[in-house]
Image (cartoon, coloured by chain):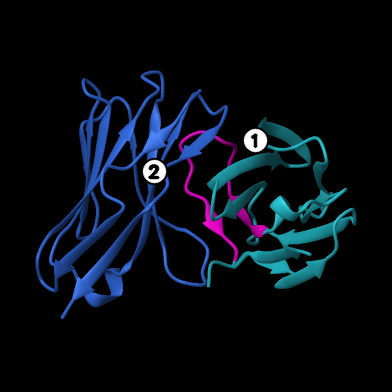
Amino acid sequence: DSGVTQTPKHLITATGQRVTLRCSPRSGDLSVYWYQQSLDQGLQFLIQYYNGEERAKGNILERFSAQQFPDLHSELNLSSLELGDSALYFCASSPRDWLMNEQFFGPGTRLTVL
Amino acid sequence: GESVGLHLPTLSVQEGDNSIINCAYSNSASDYFIWYKQESGKGPQFIIDIRSNMDKRQGQRVTVLLNKTVKHLSLQIAATQPGDSAVYFCAENNYGQNFVFGPGTRLSVLP
């Protein structure tokens, strides 16, 4: 158990809908990272927040957004969902900012878009 | 664009043997590399990392080698155990701007 929690574990929704995925980092960790893992795209970094501020952006679509709240939990919002958004979404956390940093991954949220 | 790839998508080794998982990266400016292990149904787990100013780094039963000349990264696992069966990803980072992951290599440990 990494100490990172993600809810929900599974999510099934329809195309065009909007969902919110939630992540609670390990106690004391200030950085939160979001990743998408799909069969065709593999594991892709989406975005990182550190202490409430966006720090790095990867392959995140404009339909997706994230934020980190004062209590350090983070939410990933996915809107206008498409079939291709079906994937595992992982959150990870680390104590410090981006570079040269071990990240601890949560168990993931499996999103199915029908 | 940046890309990270693996030479072998699957690798089967006998229990007790050493495993070597390879990774080729394309961005010569990448300065930090990580190996992750992902077991079925779980999130990736950090194994070992290496900075670009190093050629080798050792952990417990694992060694990462970095050859910047040919942009190659490898993960060596000594005395491979059944619990090592998983998918292994390499990832490269370019000055903290992005992490790019390889497609993964599945390691199967045979009894």
Chain that appears cyan: A
Does residue A90 show up magenta in the picture?
yes
User: In the figure, is residue B82 to the left or right of A13?
Assistant: left
Q: Residue furthest bottom?
A: B111
Residue A59 circle label: 1
Q: Describe the element under mark 2 as helix, strand or loop.
A: strand
Q: Is residue A8 visible?
A: no
Residue type at mark 1 is Asn
Does residue B36 show up magenta in the picture?
no
Q: Position of residue A18 (x, y in %)?
A: 89, 55
Tag count in the figure? 2
Residue type at mark 2 is Ile
Q: Position of residue B75 (x, y in %)?
A: 24, 48
Q: Residue at x 57, y 36 (%)?
A: A98
- Report the magenta residues as a range: A87-106
Q: Residue at x 90, y 57 (%)?
A: A17
User: In the figure, is residue B30 to the left or right of A89?
Assistant: left
Instruction: Please tell me how crowded label 2 is: few (under 14), some (14-19), or many (20+) other residues with Cα within 10 Å.
Output: many
Q: Position of residue A67 (x, y in %)?
A: 81, 45
Question: In which chain is the residue bearing label 2?
Answer: B
Q: Residue at x 76, y 52 (%)?
A: A72
- Residue depth check, mark 1 versus mark 2: number of the one nearer the observer: 1
Q: Quadrant of residue A31?
A: top right
Chain that appears blue: B
Of B60 and A61, nearer the camera is A61
Q: Residue at x 57, y 27 (%)?
A: B97
| Residues at marks 1 and 2 on the same chain | no
Q: Describe the element under mark 1 as helix, strand or loop.
A: loop
What residue would you read off at disc 2? B34
